[in-house]
Every structure is written in structure tokens, then in C-alpha cells.
Image (tube, coloured by chain):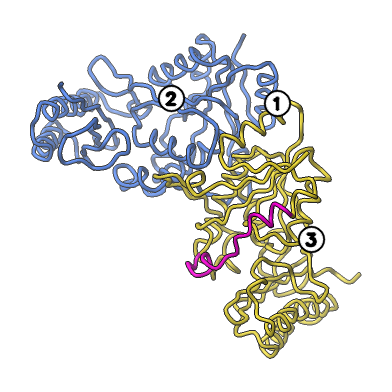
Chain colours: A yellow, B blue
Amino acid sequence: MSLTIVRTVAELRATVGEWRRAGARVAVVPTMGALHEGHLSLVRAALAEADRVIVTLFVNPRQFNSAADLAAYPRTEISDAAKLAPLGAHVLYVPDGDQMYPDGFATTVSVSGVGEGLCGAFRPGHFDGVATVVAKLFLQTGADLAFFGEKDFQQLHVVRRMAQDLDIPVEIRPCATVREPNGLAMSSRNARLTDAERMTAPKLAAALFEAADRIAGGAPVDETLAKASARIVAAGFASIEYLELRAEDDLVPMHTFDRPARLLAAAWLGEIRLIDNVRVQPAD
Amino acid sequence: MSLTIVRTVAELRATVGEWRRAGARVAVVPTMGALHEGHLSLVRAALAEADRVIVTLFVNPRQFNSAADLAAYPRTEISDAAKLAPLGAHVLYVPDGDQMYPDGFATTVSVSGVGEGLCGAFRPGHFDGVATVVAKLFLQTGADLAFFGEKDFQQLHVVRRMAQDLDIPVEIRPCATVREPNGLAMSSRNARLTDAERMTAPKLAAALFEAADRIAGGAPVDETLAKASARIVAAGFASIEYLELRAEDDLVPMHTFDRPARLLAAAWLGEIRLIDNVRVQPAD
């Protein structure tokens, strides 16, 4: 079975309707394209659990808070399709802007709590854009399962909260961050790093892993984070937007390590904003 | 077949799932209870078009901008059920607050454009509450059709926009406002009018119908609305929140009558806020 490219909601619904009548379990993997091994790991996880897998490719203007970032975002549909076909994904859904936001479009889905702070504080409107487009993709595809990477850990929380709160009958499956051998979390934005920046970039992950180990071992949280920040800047990052310990299940800020947590960071390397996060687990 | 009362999302989904497997077409009529002939006309319209009809009864705290109005809103579940059973409605869905807004609930659906101005200007947060709860009811019921009264004309636009924008596969059916013989638009809040107020209340509709006729006949819009306002206040209304001519299809404000329009008003009679609207049709 080959990869079918679908560009309209009507065609998507017709395709999924046929699958449903045949009793198939349907999964969706929402992406903005420029697919890397992280995305492909989501597709493989989806194929392992569902009968039919839809990968969506839509560079959603509503989740960009910077016009320059939107303009610079890579568009590589042909090579994306070429990566998906051999895996066995069934549909690549590539809606154009009119399918997603026709004239008169006026609705916004917002998630408070988990959508606040961290990236929510530094990218105004970003998570409204994410929650709105993902609600649409869930309802257009009617998927039973949806796969998201833990790389965008706050996004995962926002999407899960939104689907639960709006009673969208989809199960959210988080998948572990895929990293380069040097530790750098895979990201479509990595393609925009200079050679020199590529040498520096992995030091963000290294600092996070080291701080997570120290905190798990009993080091004081705020002092450990201050040292990690200094290390990231010393490595060559221009600035740190945030470096915070948050509870894994509800993203509440933590200053004492007393339950499963995530250490999350966003930092600028030249013109590129990188984010990453690692789990902090009790040593026991 | 008798009316079944359902109180949980799980039970609702199981019931609708059985209907779907039998190929039934499902309609929903969202209400806040205190059912009157206007609601019953929606249920009859739903029964005429669908195989199975769910009436929802939920006094949604998120769409009240006044705690006093919420507290005073009539709750009459037993008599509501008694009115629905003889019509042949299949399910009365009466979720409690925990089913609709469990701990941690954090999502808001907002509609700009048609949700702004008119009631949107005078009841901050009201249409966010409406759009959010109706999105949930659509997704909980999975209905193919949903019936709303034109009495709440702006709400009808907000709900239609929201469903279209979020790709919820439900068709919205507007139904004409049902009026008392004296012209008063039926409303659950009418039960709170004093005897003296009941004599005055129909004068709002009378002023709207007269102004609509004049505008349709070529009278200047703003001058006609000013006279109608004066007439409403002279009749005994305490104040007018708005009295506006708006395009029927997108609610854009109109000061010249050059396409199908609605004349919409909100006015206070004692402690009660009444709304009404009438169509303005070219005389041709």
C-alpha cells in the first residue's frame, strides 16, 4: 500500500470514513514537516498500534509569534513524503491555508495552567495557535490515537489538556525525544544552525542531563539550576529564556525535588531558539 | 420508547454508540432547562429530521457573567422531563458540573467577530462560556444535527462559527423564535417577571416589529432606531443596552438597509434583562 497525499478535508473525511467502515483503528501524527528521525519514530510508534496512520504536514502560521521564524521554517514536502513512504504510513495530509483557515475564521482554543509560563510566557499566542490547529486536526481526521514527541513537553501537556477538556475522543501518546549521537535533541530548526553552532548546541542537553543527575542525587534545586545556566552561557549560548524544574504530571513549578519532574529549558544560539527537556527521576 | 435520563459522558457515549451502529441519525437540542414552548419547538423540529433526539439540560456556570443571575436561573428538571416524554425525545442528558468541568479544566473556546458587540459587549465572557460548553456537548453527543432558536440570534452565529472553524461535523439548524400571543419572545427568564412587568414586556417586540417595518419601507435606519428606543423606554423599560441593525448573515453593523438584516435589542425591565430580534426583509 502506497502513501496517498491528501490536500482537502473532504477527501480526508472520505478516506477515513472508508477505513472506519472497515473497522480500522486510526492514528494521526501532526507535524510541520521537515521530518527528521524524531518524527519518524512517532510514525513507527503509530504504525505499531494503529491500522491506518495519517501524518499531517501543515506549517501553522497561528503558532508562530515571529514572522521571520515562520518565513524561515523549512518546507520540504517532497523529501518528507519520500521519508514516509518506505515506513508504510498511509496518508500524508497537506492542507493548504484555505482548508485550515477559510475567510471569516474566528475561533481560538486557549489552555490556561499548563499553557502558561515556560514557552507560553516567551511566545505570546503560540499555544493558542497550537491548541486551535491540533483541535482542528483531531476533528478533521477523527483519529483514535495521536502521537506527540516529548521534545515539546509543554505542547504535549497543552494538547492533552485541550483534548480532554473538549471531550475529543482521541488518546494522546507521548514518545521519547530522539537525540543525535552527541545528545542534541532533534528539531527541524537544527537545520538552520551554522557549523560552529552545531558544535555548541549539544551543550544545552549536556547541561540539562548533568543538572538532572545532581538534583536527583539531592543537590539543592535553585542552586543547581543557577550553575547549569552559567554553564550554558559559558558554552556560547547568547541567552537563556528559562531553565526550570516542573512537576512531570501538571507542570507546576518545583523548588524542591519531591516527585517525578522535568527540567525544561529554552535558549538562544545565534539566531536560533532551541528548547529541550529531560526527566528527573528519584535515584532510589 | 420512553425518555431515558443520562447523567454521565460514558453512559451517553455508550447509548449514542448503539444508535450509530444501528445507522441512526442523531440530533441534539442544547438547553439550560426551564423548558417552554420555544424549546419544545426545537425538539419537534429535531424529531422530524433525526432518528434519535438528545435534549441536554445543563445550567452552564461559565456563560453567566452575574452570580445573581446564575443563582436565580430556574431549575425544573422533573417538569422538564415531563414535557419531553410525550413528544418522543429519546434522551435527556443532565450532566453534573464534574462531568462538564472536572478538576483541572483549563480550556476556553473563543469566537471573535460575530461574538463581539451586542450581548458580547455587555456580558463579558458569556460567549466564551457558550462556545466552550456547546463544543463539549457536540463532542460528547457526536450529534449529526443541532437545533438552536433564533431568539438567541448572536449565540446561533457564535455556535455556527465555532463548529465550522473547529471542523466539528455537525449541522446547525436555526428555528424561528416562538412568541406568546401578545408577541413576547418566550424565554426562561420571563418566569421572573412581575405581573406589571408582564404587561410591559411585549412592548419590546412591538417596537422591534414596527421599526423593522419602517426600515423595510425605506425609513432612515439611525433615526428609526432612535425613535424605537424612545418608545421602549416610554413603555416602562429601565434601560436599553443595545438596539442595532445587523446583517443577517455575518452580523456586521448596518446603517443603511441594503441587504437582509436583523434588528436586535437587549433591554432591562426591573431586574430582568430581555433580548429579542426580528428579521428585516426588503419589501420588494
Q: Are marks 2 and 3 on the same chain?
A: no
Q: Which residue is mark 3?
A: A176
Identity of the amino acid at label 1?
A: Ala
Q: Which residue is mark 2?
A: B173
* Magenta stretch encompasses residue A8: no
Q: Position of residue B36 (x, y in %)?
A: 40, 20
Q: Earlier in the sequence, mark 1 or mark 2?
A: 1
Chain hosting mark 1 = B
Circle 2 crowding by C-alpha within 10 Å: few under 14, some 14–19, many from 20: some
Q: Is residue B246 above or below residue A189?
A: above
Query: Would residue B67 be visible to someone looking at this image?
Result: no
Instruction: Label 2: state its secondary structure.
Output: strand
Q: Which residue is mark 1?
A: B14
Specify start and end residues of the magenta stretch as a single range. Answer: A65-82
Instruction: Label 3: state its secondary structure.
Output: loop
Identity of the amino acid at label 2?
A: Arg
* Magenta stretch encompasses residue A74: yes
Q: Position of residue B180 (x, y in %)?
A: 28, 17
Are the residues at dot 1 and dot 2 in contact (C-beta closer than 8 Å)?
Answer: no
Chain hosting mark 3 = A
Q: Position of residue A204 (x, y in %)?
A: 72, 79
> What's the residue at 54%, 71% (across, down)?
A122
Q: Nearer the viewer, residue A174 or A77?
A: A77
Considering the whole magenta stretch, tell me its main secondary structure. helix
Query: Would residue B168 be visible to someone looking at this image?
Result: yes
Q: Nearer the viewer, residue B191 or B253?
A: B253
